[in-house]
Image (spheres, grey):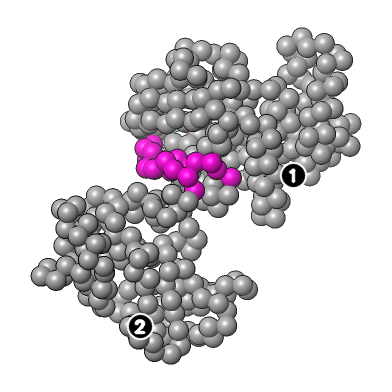
Amino acid sequence: MTEVRLEKVSKYFGETKAVDNVDLQVNDGEFMVLLGPSGCGKTTTLRLIAGLEKPTSGLILFNGEVVNELEPKDRRIAMVFQDYALYPHMKVFDNLALNLQVRGVPRDEIRKRVSETAELLGIKHLLDRKPGQLSGGEQQRVALGRAIIREPSVFLMDEPLSNLDAALRARMRGELKKLQERLKTTTIYVTHDQVEAMVMADRIAVMRNGKVQQIGSPQEIYNRPANKFVAEFVGSPKMNVFDATVVSREHTKLTTGEFDINIPSSMAQRIVESGSGPEVMVGIRPENVAVSTAYQEGFLEATVYLVEDIGNLSFVTLQVGDILIVAQAPPSVGLRVGDKAYFSLLVEKLHIFDKKTEKLIV
Ligand SMILES: Nc1ncnc2c1ncn2[C@@H]1O[C@H](COP(=O)(O)OP(=O)(O)O)[C@@H](O)[C@H]1O
Ligand SMILES: [Mg+2]
């Protein structure tokens, strides 16, 4: 039973603000993912929670108690890294058993726990091998086993799947998620892979430049991104974002300069009330852009700039003047580069961002 809380935590390395005033609460049993691009401070945040780094300022609490001064070994955490850091000269059994041996756990108990852990991870048949005789996926399981066997209160995982090939990574993320649901151990998982974050997390904390941008369930992050950065970072292909102006006298219309978008009056009202505008940014995900070879009522004209067919889906990039918009379509749409096409934006799925702050308005 462990809840982890960060209160206004910062970590500076000289001039670099690796972690900048982070507030984060991870509930007991929760699977929290820290998501963000390389260098945004994910690993440093994890190392602070582990006790491998001391915060420059702020508090780290486990179950409401400040642990800032507590050594890593006294925090009941287990870390899993990208490189598995197994001991190459030791058999899998001993890699799993080592930590228990060091702590003086009786031999019979060790045997039992190694056996149970190996069973859980499906690596029982590998106990007599050395790490060099294992595949990447098997090594990753052993690394996980080594963390699990210690029965920690918190798992800290730093991009643990990123050394695996794509197919194995996809399988392991599902297995890891199921395992965490079974063990119900509070888990903080770091990744730069937004798909991994979406499918594994109970909640995601999106980070950028050491700061938390948004914390929410995968659905909240996807459907209501707090700002342009989150909007573009989550989702593939990424959200279309382009500049637009609120047409001054008639507030229910936006113009991009190339085409106009009629918006519901409630949306227009929110923009006016926010004090933003007339310059805004408009975001729309590819699945909310309809595209067709034939003109339909209310559709706008464009030229096909690029077609990317991934088998079950086709991503069609449309060009209107100097604006490019990606639309998701069935492969049967039958559009080719240079074709004339017609598109429509699903207005209720528009995101409007403030041009200056890049924060979500509607
Ligand atoms: N020990 C360190 N000394 C100096 N700078 C560091 C150190 N560790 C990390 N940094 C810097 O802090 C920032 C965040 O790094 P990191 O937490 O590793 O990011 P991420 O894991 O998101 O890629 C980067 O600019 C990185 O160069
Ligand atoms: Mg890192």
Horizontal and vertical percent position of residue 286: 45, 68
Q: Which residue does the numbered mark 1 point to in the structure image?
A: 137
In the image, is 82 to the left or to the right of 110?
left
Tell me the residue at 38%/31% (across/down).
Answer: 22
Upstream in sequence: badge 1 or badge 2: 1
Above or below, 319 relative to 171 = below
Q: Is residue 38 visible?
A: no
The amino acid marked with disc number 1 is Gly
Quadrant of image for the N terminus = top right
Q: Which residue does the numbered mark 2 point to in the structure image?
A: 299
The mark tally for this picture is 2
Which element type, helix, strand or loop, lies under badge 1?
Answer: helix
In the rendered structure, which segment of residues is drawn in magenta? Answer: 200-218
Q: Judge: label 1 CB < 8 Å from ligand 2.
A: no
Q: Main secondary structure of the magenta part?
A: strand
Tell me the residue at 22%/57% (across/down).
Answer: 270
Tell me the residue at 28%/50% (across/down).
Answer: 359
In the image, is 109 to the left or to the right of 85?
right
Horizontal and vertical percent position of residue 129: 87, 34
Quadrant of image for the C terminus = bottom left
Is the residue marked by circle 2 packed among few (<14), some (14-19), or many (20+) residues within 10 Å?
Answer: some
User: What is the distance, in whole Å, between disc 1 and disc 2 at their CAs?
Assistant: 49 Å
Is the residue marked by circle 1 packed among few (<14), some (14-19), or many (20+) residues within 10 Å?
Answer: some
Above or below, 289 relative to 12 = below
Horizontal and vertical percent position of residue 333: 53, 83
Outermost residue, front direction?
266
In the image, is 321 to the left or to the right of 137?
left
Horizontal and vertical percent position of residue 29: 58, 30
Rendering quadrant holding ligand 1? top left
